[in-house]
Amino acid sequence: MKKNELQQAHYQTVGIHDKLIINLRDLSHIMRFLYEGKGSQKRILIIMNEVGIITQRELTERLGIQPGSASEVIAKLEDAGYIMRTPSKTDRRTMDIELTETGKVSALEAAGQRNRRHEEMFSCLSADEKDTLLSLLEKVNTDWKRRYQEVEEKHKHCDHRRGCHGHRGQKHH
């Protein structure tokens, strides 16, 4: 039996809760594949186009990534001519980051691509089905945040690529 056939056979034998988790896991993998990550260049351009001038620290916090990762991506964007850094007028210790004209054009293109992809991702659903799905996801999300808040806090600063130190070195997915 091929891997896909084994997975399908297993899926047919499990209960509703396992089927829900399997589907959520599979959707998560597809979304990770479609999106380059929290600190992708396109995501940074889109965010910066929405907020305007921002400090590197504020951008790093908004993205939820490590400062070193942000510095690397910001340097690449600056080298490509998409952003420029200038000393902050209010705090000389920090740098303000803003889009160049080229960066603004690229940000608008990236936002358009993202919007088209989002529409495509849910094109199999009617408007009523989208409303129902959203309502159900919000309900589950609210409950899980409340119910599993402690687990979420423990893993908030976990580096999933290297494993979570202090959590027996296991990766958590």
Image: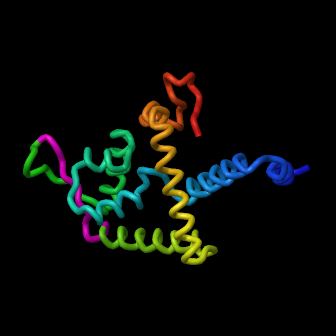
Residue 48: name its quadrant. bottom left
- Work out whether residue 108 or residue 115 is closer to the camera in this orientation and state it: 115
Tell me what residue is drawn at x 33 percent, y 60 percent: 47
- Image quadrant where one finds the C terminus: top right
Tell me what residue is drawn at x 49 percent, y 22 percent: 166
Residue 33: name its quadrant. bottom right
Question: Left of 45 or right of it: where is 146?
Answer: right
Question: Left of 71 or right of it: where is 13?
Answer: right
- Work out whether residue 77 or residue 172 is closer to the camera in this orientation and state it: 172
Whether residue 158 can be seen here: no
Count numbered badges in the picture.
Answer: 0
Magenta stretch: includes residue 100: yes
Question: Left of 1 or right of it: where is 41?
Answer: left
Tell me what residue is drawn at x 40 percent, y 73 percent: 109
Tell me what residue is drawn at x 45 percent, y 37 percent: 149
* Residue 143 on image: x %, y %: 50, 46
Magenta stretch: includes residue 150: no
* Residue 172 on image: x %, y %: 57, 35
Residue 126: name its quadrant. bottom right
Residue bounds of the magenta highlight? 93-103
